[in-house]
Image (cartoon, grey):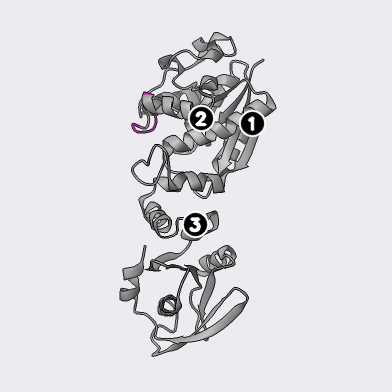
């Protein structure tokens, strides 16, 4: 029996690819990756439904560095899909060698995504992965050149598929036929494909090229402000945001909260100067219950120290000019 390791997102295509091989007797294990931009929740649910073992690996720091400067560039937003798929295959390839899997597979469908799943892009992913001869794409295999795995009899080409294009009709028919009853709708799942988040991330990378996974996590919570080339501010929109921001704040970040009035927590990041601290305090005050006061006191803490500053709350129409 041949052994295969597959990339599993938890979507319909990757689940069907695993089933396609499993149904012809291949011993299938899947792997899902965790980054600041997508997680493994869908993959865990899919693997449980499929009854297939799942490996989960966090590649956040490495993935972020690739996102900053992808070899093959971006899609419509900050999504470097070709580089991302190649990186995941490269990581899976290392596990393939260490744990004696025979080949890798994915749920990619020829022509489903015009920019990242055309024939040229699939070839680029394979070549950049470092293991181009050991990658099988069961969903479109009959439309692609025969692979070494098929020639060696590790898989039966006649039982592979010939799906192409953006329609999901064939996949939905197969899901019904093969008893796959639960799967997410198409699209979504990766923050890098979303314009609003991509705009925030682009601003972060441009101003702070050395940004970390922790900096990216802050972008995902609350209102985000670019106060100056040196400083950015995250402001909670509700209690849940406030609690999340408090937990996400790094050692070098400053916590900003108005004294004597309920309101949001602010996290000031980057390399702020005194003007940035004053601006952050004023913005946080402008979103709190003391916004109508002539002046309020704000506590700024971090790095083992704290201080109090007096500021005039910033009117919302002005602070919105700094919104990302």
Q: Quadrant of residue 225?
A: bottom left
What is the secondary structure assignment of the residue under circle 3?
A: loop
The image shows residue 70 at horizontal and vertical percentages of 43, 41
- Name the residue beneath numbered marker 1: 95
Circle nearer the N terminus (2, 3): 2
Classify mark 2: helix, strand or loop: helix
Residue 310 magenta: no
Q: CA distance from mark 1 to mark 2?
A: 13 Å
Look at the image and tell me whether residue 65 can be seen: yes
**Vertical side of 9 occupied by 108: above or below:** above
Q: Which mark is residue 250?
A: none
Q: Is residue 115 magenta?
A: yes
Packing grade of label 1 (10 A; few <14, some 14-19, many >=20) is: some
Q: Which residues are magenta?
A: 114-119
Mark 2 neighbour density, 10 Å: few (under 14) some (14–19) many (20 or more): many
Image coordinates for residue 135, horizontal then vertical, percent: 52, 23
Tag 1, which secondary structure?
helix
Q: Work out whether mark 1 precedes mark 3 in sequence or the reverse, and give the earlier one.
A: 1
Q: CA distance from mark 2 to mark 3?
A: 26 Å
Q: Quadrant of the N terminus?
A: top right
Q: Please name the residue that numbered disc 2 is placed on.
A: 129
Name the residue nearer the viewer: 197 or 163.
Answer: 197
> Between marks 1 and 3, how big is the CA–CA gap?
28 Å
Magenta segment main secondary structure: loop
Q: Is residue 54 above or below residue 261?
A: above
**Residue at horizontal 60%, vertical 79%?**
305
* Residue corresponding to mark 3: 211
């Amino acid at each position: 029996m041949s052994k295969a390791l597959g990339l599993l997102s938890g979507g319909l295509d990757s689940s069907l690819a695993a089933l396609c091989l499993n149904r012809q007797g291949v011993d299938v294990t899947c792997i899902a990756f965790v980054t600041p931009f997508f997680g493994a929740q869908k993959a865990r649910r899919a693997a449980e439904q499929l009854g297939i073992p799942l490996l989960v690996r966090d590649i956040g720091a490495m993935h972020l560095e690739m996102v900053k400067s992808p070899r093959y560039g971006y899609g419509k937003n900050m999504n470097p899909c070709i580089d991302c798929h190649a990186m995941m295959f490269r990581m899976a390839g290392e596990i393939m060698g260490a744990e004696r899997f025979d080949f890798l597979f994915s749920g990619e469908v020829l022509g489903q995504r015009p920019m990242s799943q055309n024939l040229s892009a699939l070839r680029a992913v394979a070549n950049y992965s470092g293991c181009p001869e050991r990658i099988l794409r069961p969903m479109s295999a009959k439309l692609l050149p025969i692979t070494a795995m098929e020639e060696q009899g590790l898989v039966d080409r006649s039982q592979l598929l010939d799906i192409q294009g953006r329609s999901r009709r064939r996949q939905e028919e197969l899901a019904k036929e093969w008893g796959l009853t639960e799967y997410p709708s198409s699209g979504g799942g990766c923050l890098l494909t979303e314009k609003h988040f991509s705009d925030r991330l682009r601003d972060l990378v441009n101003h702070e090229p050395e940004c970390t996974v922790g900096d990216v996590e802050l972008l995902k919570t609350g209102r985000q402000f670019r106060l100056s080339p040196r400083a950015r501010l995250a402001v909670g929109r509700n209690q849940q945001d406030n609690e999340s921001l408090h937990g996400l704040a790094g050692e070098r970040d400053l916590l900003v909260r108005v004294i004597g009035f309920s309101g949001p927590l602010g996290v000031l990041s980057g390399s702020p100067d005194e003007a940035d601290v004053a601006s952050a305090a004023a913005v946080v005050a402008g979103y709190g219950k003391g916004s109508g006061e002539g002046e309020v006191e704000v506590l700024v803490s971090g790095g083992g120290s704290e201080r109090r500053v007096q500021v005039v709350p910033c009117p919302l129409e002005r602070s919105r000019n700094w919104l990302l």
